[in-house]
Image (cartoon, grey):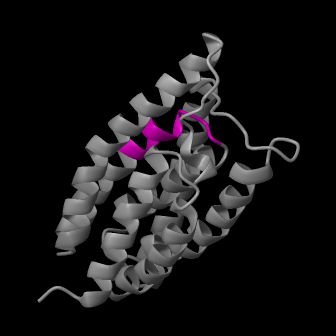
Amino acid sequence: MTDPLEIAATVLTLICVLLAVKRSLWQFPTGILGTALGFFVFWGAGLYSSAFLQPFFIVVQVYGWWYWTRGDKGHKPRIRSTDPWLVAIVCLAALCVAIGAAYALEQLTDAQMAVPDAAIFGLSIVAQILLDRKRVENWPVWVVVNILSVYVYASQGLWLYTVLYAFFIFNAFWGWWEWRKELLSYGAGVDSAKDESAA
């Protein structure tokens, strides 16, 4: 039988990510609640890196909430782009740190799937910070995170999370398309009247 806590965390996380694609501020309170519930789901499954990731997500989502409303000198910031090479270097550094942490977890705890779980931790930090800073490159990083998540969560029998993150793979491509379309509209001199971050 599926844990009701996993059901609630899954539904809230799904709503949060769909709202992120549409650039709605409601992603943040929804995501914070889903993240808080996710901590207990992952801890119970022995996925300690994913569990430890949840408090971090709460902090950065609070920051993201502020940044999306007042982060550009008191105004709502636009979507921006970051050098892909810089993103790749930061992702590589995050993976190196994550692998070191995974080794420690394997030695000191009964952690399950320590290396891929830690990779999810490291790359999710990068992706979430990019999302909070309204950088379009957050979506390709999420694609990698979501693929890893499907493998890890299926291995641990977290089937709702497995289905959710399988959907998130496709959702990340949709998010990239939506955000890139808006980014390109700035170059055409089109103001983003459809930006739903005001919602």
Residue 83: percent from left, percent from top: 63, 23
Q: Is residue 176 magenta?
A: no
Horizontal side of residue 8 vs 32, given as left or right? left
Question: Farthest residue in the left direction?
Answer: 1
Which is the main secondary structure of the residues drawn in magenta?
helix
Q: Quadrant of residue 115?
A: bottom left
Q: Name the residue rendered at 31%, 58% in the picture.
A: 149
Q: Name the residue rendered at 31%, 68% in the picture.
A: 113
Residue 86: percent from left, percent from top: 63, 29
Q: Name the residue rendered at 39%, 53% in the picture.
A: 18
Q: Quadrant of residue 116?
A: bottom left
Q: In which quadrant will I find the N terminus?
A: bottom left
Horizontal side of residue 16 vs 113, given as left or right? right
Q: Is residue 136 magenta?
A: yes
Q: Write the start and end of the magenta stretch as one range.
A: 134-143
Q: Is residue 119 above or below residue 2?
A: above
In the image shown, does 184 or 168 lie closer to the viewer?
184
In the image shown, does 33 or 97 lie closer to the viewer?
33
Q: In which quadrant will I find the C terminus?
A: bottom right
Q: Name the residue rendered at 41%, 87% in the picture.
A: 40
Question: Farthest residue in the top direction?
Answer: 188
